[in-house]
Amino acid sequence: MGSIQALRGTRDILPAEVGYWQLVEDTARQILSRALYQEIRSPLLEQTDLFVRGIGEGTDVVGKEMYSFSDRSGRQLTLRPEGTAGVVRAYVEHGLDKIGGIQRLWYQGPMFRYERPQAGRQRQFHQIGLELLGSGSPRADVEVIALASDILRALGLKDLSLQLNSIGNRDDRQKYRTALLDYLLPLEQELDSDSKYRLRRNPLRILDSKDPKTQEIARNAPSILDYLSKESLAHFEQVQYLLTELGITYQINPSLVRGLDYYTHTAFEIQSADLGAQSTVCGGGRYDGLVGELGGNDTQAIGWAIGVERLVLLLKELRPLPGLEPDFYIVSKGEKAEAQALKIAQILRSNNLKVELDLSSSAFGKQLKRADRSGAPIALILGDEEAQNQTVKLKWLKSAQETTIPSDQLIADPTSYLELR
Ligand code: ATP
Ligand code: MG
């Protein structure tokens, strides 16, 4: 029988790679907790309706990318394609919109979209995201952008560019939509087929089409920035002023519109020049309409999501993972010695040391070869004699120097032996 393989668009993250993931997660957790963001974990499965209402029917995600199915009792369910809708559902469901004040939340985990898999684009992929709910201040926008930039910088990424736009409020967008349609309708026949489909559903999305001909048409389209109300413009200008104050450089990109309907005002992406077609590592924006849309009190909010796969691709180019060498490699042979070795391993590990135990019972020479390959500075050797005398032989693997000491002496101060000899 043939072997079973992972589904197309899903990947195993093997031990050789997982260190990058842990680095990304640890860095994000550390930086976000210093800004008092708290982690929230919401289910991977939600009612399909949550995403239809929260993301919008005219979007690619809802229109063609969702993993939706009916369960055994006929409920329509969807594997979450993004994190915001679930977080906002939880926020409303638990009345967090009613207690007032600001909620700073972050999440991480797998998302599911039925897309054509390629480098940096998967069907099960992972995001780290944050949501700041309860503030409409431009300072909130800049706080979250700065946090994304801090995380990427702490990981050592360079050549990143922040693309910034404002899509105004609902009214601004309504006016702009009309102007955009006036411009696009006469050109309908020249648009790619996806864009034709979007024309009457979500014409703003046409602006970030990847089709060259459509891109050309989009370049000459009216700019959303000319349709912003006075208040929207003031918000956008304040965001730019504060970014400049923080020394965060940005480029204004009027065709950056994001795929999701609930966005208002600030929209941004952080892109890397080193990622080819899948260049966006972080996308986000303000979504003042969403909490109300999902049945909560009107709440202003902003958030972003980082694509972890793309970040890991960049990190792999940038640097190797730190090694996983043990501090001690324990070699033992004989019943008593092997039991003793197990015990010493436990004690050393409880002292916060990394200890690898050879379980082979093979000849000492073979075990010591493996000790060499492990990269440990010291091998601890236990045979019948050591077991008998309650001693342990230390061998510094670089110099081949050896000494035998009472086990108690090693256990009393193991780190003092780690210095090179
Ligand atoms: P794209 O234009 O690349 O499809 P998007 O606008 O659909 O991105 P968002 O919904 O804003 O993406 O998600 C935020 C981030 O999540 C993206 O910038 C990207 O880094 C990552 N991401 C989105 N879809 C995928 C995917 N299928 N595989 C891997 N990462 C993804
Ligand atoms: Mg997409």
Image: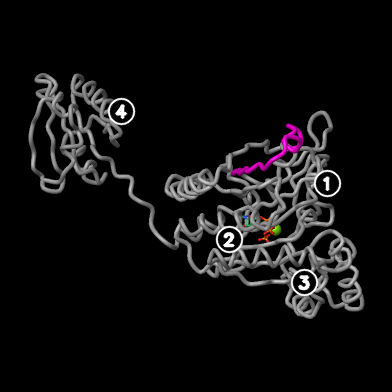
Can residue 208 be seen here? yes
> Dividing the image into 4 quarters, which one contains the C terminus?
top left
Distance between mark 3 and mark 2 Cα atoms: 33 Å
Q: Verify CB contact (< 8 Å) between mark 3 and mark 2.
A: no
Q: Amino acid type of disc 4?
A: Ser
Q: Residue at x 84, y 64 (%)?
A: 173
**Mark found first going from the N terminus, 4 or 1:** 1
Q: Nearer the viewer, residue 31 or 65?
A: 31
Q: Nearer the viewer, residue 291 or 367?
A: 291
Q: What residue did someone put label 4 on?
A: 350
- How far is disc 4 from disc 1 in space, using C-alphas? 51 Å
- Residue stretch in magenta: 92-109
Q: For residue 203, what is the image quadrant?
A: bottom right
Q: Label 2 belongs to which residue?
A: 119
How far apart are the alpha carbons under marks 1 and 3? Answer: 27 Å
**Position of residue 67 measured from the top left corner of the image (x, y, whole percent):** 74, 45
Residue placed at 63% from the left, 67% from the top?
A: 241
Q: Nearer the viewer, mark 3 or mark 2?
A: 3
Frontmost residue, 66 versus 327: 327
x 73%, y 77%: residue: 212
Q: Point out which mark residue 53 bears.
A: 1
Nearest to N terminus: mark 4 or mark 2: 2
Tell me how far mark 3 sits from mark 4, CA to CA. 61 Å
In the rendered image, which residue does mark 3 sit on?
225
Report the coloring of the rendering: one colour
Label 3 SS: helix
Question: Which badge, 3 or 2, is on the more N-terminal residue?
Answer: 2
- The kind of residue tagged 3 is Leu
Circle nearer the viewer, 1 or 3: 3
